[in-house]
Amino acid sequence: MEDRARDGESATSGRSRPSWYTWLAFGVYCAMLVWVVMLKFHTSFTDLGGRRSLNLVPFGASGDLSGLGSREIALNVLAFIPFGLLVYFITGRRNIWWPSVVVVLTSLAFEAIQYATGWGASDVTDVITNVAGGLIGIGIATGATRMLAQRAERAAVISLAATLLMLAIAIAVWLKVSGIHFRL
């Protein structure tokens, strides 16, 4: 039992406990996700109001899958892949049901808060694509766990952290080159 506890697995439940770096990555990623999804990259709350709308037709506004609609769909899926991966490791579960529930409820909460605050358009397409991305992330975590066992969490979190760092650098360079500035 001591060996299992030392390896990050609970001696009583057989589930692994998330490490501190997984919690740190989860916290940082959630903050970034809120900034992107809820705040739309804004740094001031005054720029956000007045856009309350509700679309209950799946892929209604982006049904032609061209232009901004298809890019928004792809970005929603991509944004939630790391979230699903991290939720899988945070929950310490080795099945997909509980992490899937967390992904669905998080996506629904984002859309409900956007509608209630008027910070953006609430769209059923966003819920569908966010959940799809989260499920892909859970699938990646499940596969990694089966192939790498206990090392999967560390490998996934380190890979995710490196990817996010590279993405942050790329965004910073793009902002510098494009001349876009944010108000603080």
Image: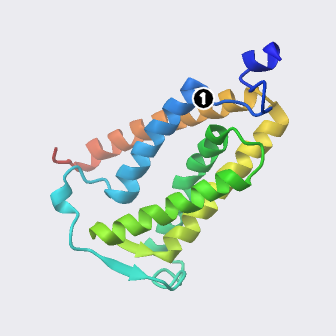
The answer to whether residue 34 is seen in the rendering is: yes
In the image: residue 31, left or right of residue 48 = right
Q: Quadrant of the N terminus?
A: top right
Above or below, comparing residue 126 to residue 167 in the picture: below
- Percent across and percent down for residue 139 are 73, 51
In the shown orientation, is residue 124 left or right of residue 14?
A: left
- Secondary structure, mark 1, is helix
Rendered residue at 76%/34% (across/down): 15
Whether 14 is drawn above or below 76: the answer is above
Q: How many marks?
A: 1
Q: Dot 1 corresponds to which residue?
A: 158
Q: Which amino acid does the dot numbered 1 rest on?
A: Ile
Q: Residue 68: x and y, percent?
A: 43, 72
Question: In the image, what residue occupies the spot 73% across and 31% down?
Answer: 16
Q: Is 124 situated above or below 151?
A: below
Q: Residue furthest front?
A: 12
The quadrant of the image that shows the C terminus is: top left
Which residue shows up at 60% across the image and 42% down it? 86
129 left or right, relative to 151: left
The residue sitting at 77% across, 27% down in the picture is 150
Q: How crowded is mark 1: few (under 14 residues within 10 Å), some or many (20 or more)?
A: some
Q: Which colour scheme is used?
A: rainbow
Q: Can residue 67 be seen in this view?
A: no
User: 172 or 39: which is nearer to us?
Assistant: 39
Left or right: 57 as drawn, with respect to 134: left
User: Residue 103, percent across and down?
Assistant: 58, 56
